Amino acid sequence: MKSDHISTSDIRSAFSAAMSAMYREEVPAYGTLMELVGRVNDETLAARPALKERLQATDYLDRISEERHGAIRLGTAAELAMMARVFAVMGMYPVGYYDLSTAGVPVHSTAFRPIGDAELKRNPFRVFTSLLRLDLIADEDLREASAQILSKRQIFTEGAIALTEKAERNGGLGKEDAQHFVNEVLETFRWHDEANVDAAMYHRLHDAHRLIADVVSFKGPHINHLTPRTLDIDQVQSLMPEYGIAPKAVVEGPPTRACPILLRQTSFKALEEPVSFRNADGVWETASHTARFGEIEQRGIALTPKGRALYDKLLDNSRKIVRPAADGSNARDYEAALAQSFAEFPDDWSAIRAESLGYFTYSLTAKGKAAATTRGDIEALINQGLVQFDPIVYEDFLPVSAAGIFQSNLGDGAQQEFVASPNQKRFETDLGMKVLNEFDHYAGIEQASIDACLQALSKQDAAE
């Protein structure tokens, strides 16, 4: 990076702040949600001083108040490829492949996010980015009409494209260009209440699937939610009605645990917003569209492949007992089934580590920092009280949970079935690059922390 270029983290931070301000203005309930989450986080930290201490020690505390992620839905391969280039200017790269067709949503997705530990701690903003699967639309005429509509739109401003190309040529952007870049890219995510289609086409798309209508009918991929992170999602869920917010029926993901794993998510129901359609005679017709909502997440430890296999098995078991209904009519039964199934997953950090179910970072204790001569592997050093371990935060997503959030905000009874057809190779071709493997990423962070501990102790030996 040239000396006059600002960092990708600074661009990402500026964009995240601009996105938050825009969404707060467009969706006032999001601001209310932020107030509620702030209150719950403050109360949780006050009640759990040990948690606050570890968050401070691991540099995670300052991250809690940051908006954690947004979500967009794209319509074409060209849009996805250009979006990847735009996010790269902000230091965000595609991690993971998610097939949501298995849960009745005709998209596949990735998460654009920073990937280094230092970058994540500076600003963890991420965008869950989905690409519409036109091949899953059964109606051939509607499929072709949708492709034609999408081919005619340009979701990026000329300025956004030009500045992305400039950043690629020059290896970054200066301060003035960076601010201009943020402003231009923000336009891609802005809400537009004038549809690209007439009312008749909108209803055809809507009848095929509400998400298809949301992607095809508008000028761009308006941000459909922003998500702050909470330390107690159950408390947020219970307090939402007190703040005039209607929560979805159940919290997605694993059950309440002493040692949180992966990701839990809830949301307030999507807004019904006025939309104008220009009909064939040129007359504007006003109707409504439902898509944008507010979401909250609670993040736990990243699981190893073994841990994730156990999680997937237990989640599947719980849904064999009770499958959550979109209208929330069996919410209590589902929560009971979830708790029953997950009793098999250890709820203690030491047990999770001993069974190789989760990823941890390792650091020297006060005793370790003062040690003179030490030898041994990481287990021996832990047993001697020289090294401690902390869970690595899961930075990614869960396809069943994402689909559950989408479905709950598409209206009660909106569940529709598609043939499960994951196609990561096709997605990566459209993206123009491979997505990063999340397990490799977490394993690398864990190993680097182990190496750092051993190296530090070795240096202390050498100094003697």
Image: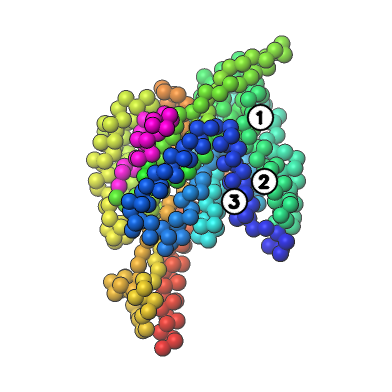
Check disc 1 and report the residue beneath it: 219
Residue drawn at (39%, 66%), measured in percent from left and top? 362
Check disc 3 and report the residue beneath it: 13
Q: Quadrant of residue 324?
A: top left
Q: Nearer the viewer, residue 375 or 208?
A: 375
Q: CA distance from mark 1 to mark 3?
A: 26 Å
Residue drawn at (36%, 71%), measured in percent from left and top? 365
Q: CA distance from mark 2 to mark 3?
A: 10 Å
Tell me the crowding category of disc 3: few under 14, some 14 to 19, or many 20 or more residues within 10 angstroms, Cα based. Answer: some
Q: Which residues are magenta?
A: 234-257
Local secondary structure at mark 2: helix
Tell me the crowding category of disc 2: few under 14, some 14 to 19, or many 20 or more residues within 10 angstroms, Cα based. Answer: many
- Which residue type carries mark 3? Ser
Q: Which mark is residue 182?
A: 2
Q: Residue furthest top?
A: 281
**Marks 2 & 3, CB-CB < 8 Å contact:** no
Horizontal relation, residue 168 to residue 334: left or right: right
